[in-house]
Image (spheres, grey):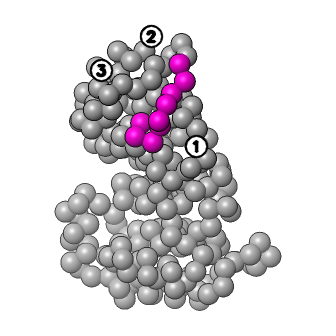
Amino acid sequence: MKNASPENEGPSNAEVKAALASLKRLGTKRTRDEMVRYGTYVKKVFGVPVGAMQTLAKRLGRNHELATALWDSGWYQARMVAAFLDEPEQVTPAQMDRWCRDFDNWDVCDTVCFHLFARAPHAFGKVAPWARSRDEFVKRGAFALLACLALHDRRAHDEWFAESLPLVERAASDERNFVKKGVSWALREAFAAASTFPLDAQIQPPTAGFRALCMTDCSQFSGELGCFHQ
């Protein structure tokens, strides 16, 4: 399948149905059972291994319109494939917000942030508003995205991650499991990626002890982070 262009009308129903049919054929009960064991609970699921989804996405080729249609189908594996298919440069802030509101499990959240959102031009601007959300998976999306930006974005400046420290600190007291793990991930990756931080009235450079703390359970952060403020 050729990459979609802005002049194209979008994928045909036949293309969308063919992609969904492929996912259905690849699904197995074993994979569905494994998903439950790893904490992924969704209603519309075929049960396709990640490797098979990536192979299918590679065969289909990058296609923004098809990715959008597969996402809108609501099927778990279709949304995973959408993350592999979509073209980051065509992802808009509105699309990011819409997809983030659809997050209902950690797996799709993290996959979309890792493979797509972190490579989109508007990515860093979404961290702060999502971090203020009360929704568990929108909030996880904020910190999954922050972690993925630290991993992927070579244009990122240390100041960006320093500015995110108050967001991490406020979220560190959130006891919801998927938020807590997202915060822990973001803290580890952001400070591992940042070699230096600017001195200002809010944040001191991370010490060796702080970096070690990044590897501990997130439940400790809320009581410890304050010692790094002036």
The magenta stretch spans residue 2:
no
Mark 1 is surrounded, within 10 Å at the Cα level, by few (under 14), some (14 to 19) or many (20 or more) other residues, namely: some
> In the rendered image, which residue does mark 2 sit on?
230
- Disc 2 residue type (three-letter): Gln
Q: Residue at x 25, y 27 (%)?
A: 220
Q: Nearer the viewer, residue 51 or 155?
A: 155
Q: CA distance from mark 1 to mark 3?
A: 26 Å
Dot 1: element: loop
| Left or right: 145, with 171 as reference point | right
Q: Amino acid at mark 1?
A: Ala
Residue identifier under label 1: 156
- State the CA–CA distance, disc 2 to disc 1: 25 Å
Give amino acid for label 3.
Answer: Glu
- Residue denoted by label 3: 224
Residue found 53% across the figure and 40% down from its top:
127
The chief SS type of the magenta part is loop
Residue for point 50% across, 78% down: 57
Q: Which residues are magenta?
A: 191-199
Q: Residue furthest right?
A: 7
